[in-house]
Image (cartoon, coloured by chain):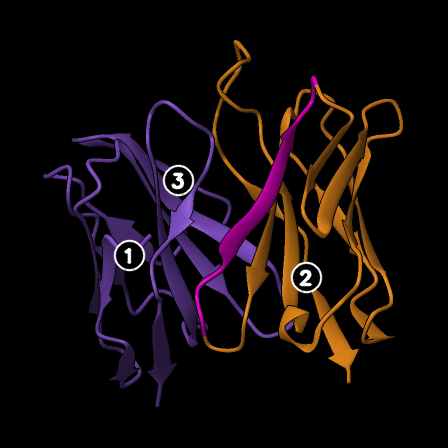
Chain colours: A orange, B purple
Amino acid sequence: GENVEQHPSTLSVQEGDSAVIKCTYSDSASNYFPWYKQELGKRPQLIIDIRSNVGEKKDQRIAVTLNKTAKHFSLHITETQPEDSAVYFCAASIGGRSGGSNYKLTFGKGTLLTVNP
Amino acid sequence: DGGITQSPKYLFRKEGQNVTLSCEQNLNHDAMYWYRQDPGQGLRLIYYSQIVNDFQKGDIAEGYSVSREKKESFPLTVTSAQKNPTAFYLCATRTGATDTQYFGPGTRLTVL
């Protein structure tokens, strides 16, 4: 089955700096890659996602890049703010545009991001 | 994801007892999922259901059971066969038209 590795496990940055979190996946059939943000004791919330037919996607201060050949994707947060502090999870699945779709998300173990004021 | 409710928020269980966690949704989503989250770990898939009256095992189904008799409901039973049930349990839903999963607020289960 799919295996997703996420690095680093913890990341501390100064307010205003950029943060980058990287994930690798094992199943070349995976074609859907969401990122979730989870604050302490709360539910994970989708912040951005990307499909394998796209190399990069941006939404304000957040961007995700995908390298299908190397099977890795990354989350980039620019101009970090204290409210960005949370655990971030990457995930991968074989989504609805593939004949072998299973819609099963496999998650990385998470990155605890701390933004220091 | 405001249309997904999980109850109770906190649950305490004695060893050897079965317990059922509730997940209800009013989003009219076809698919529902159960995940387990342990400290420092990602989310691991327990069971999922793509349609009413059908469900499949996820990666860690042993010691758990589910039913999907109604589109709105997907209860999870943690049985006494689950060796280490203390964890944060999250339910998620997905509309059939997209890949995106939305999460409920979770139930924190503690075995005493």
Res B5 seen here = yes
Vertically, is B94 above or below B14? above
Type of amino acid under label 1? Gly
Marks 3/1 in contact by CB < 8 Å: the verdict is no
* Residue under numbered circle 1: B2
Marks 3/2 in contact by CB < 8 Å: the verdict is no
Residue interval drawn in magenta = A42-53
The residue located at (22%, 74%) in the rendering is: B8
Marks 1/2 in contact by CB < 8 Å: the verdict is no
Instruction: Tell me residue A82's x, y (percent).
Output: 69, 77
The answer for how far apart the CA atoms under marks 1 and 2 are is 24 Å
* Residue under numbered circle 2: A110
Label 3 environment density (alpha carbons within 10 Å; few <14, some 14–19, many ≥20): some
Residues indicated by labels 3 and 2 sit on the same polypeptide chain: no
The quadrant of the image that shows the C terminus of chain A is: bottom right
Q: Secondary structure at mark 3?
A: strand
Instruction: Tell me residue B93's x, y (percent).
Output: 33, 43
Type of amino acid under label 3? Lys
Q: Secondary structure at mark 1?
A: loop
User: Is residue A82 left or right of A71 when viewed as pictured?
Assistant: left
Mark 3 vs mark 2, foreground winner is: 2
The residue located at (78%, 25%) in the rendering is: A55
Image disc number at residue A115: none
* Residue under numbered circle 3: B57
Dot placed on the residue nearer the N-terminal end, 3 or 1: 1
The answer for how far apart the CA atoms under marks 3 and 1 are is 26 Å
Type of amino acid under label 2? Gly
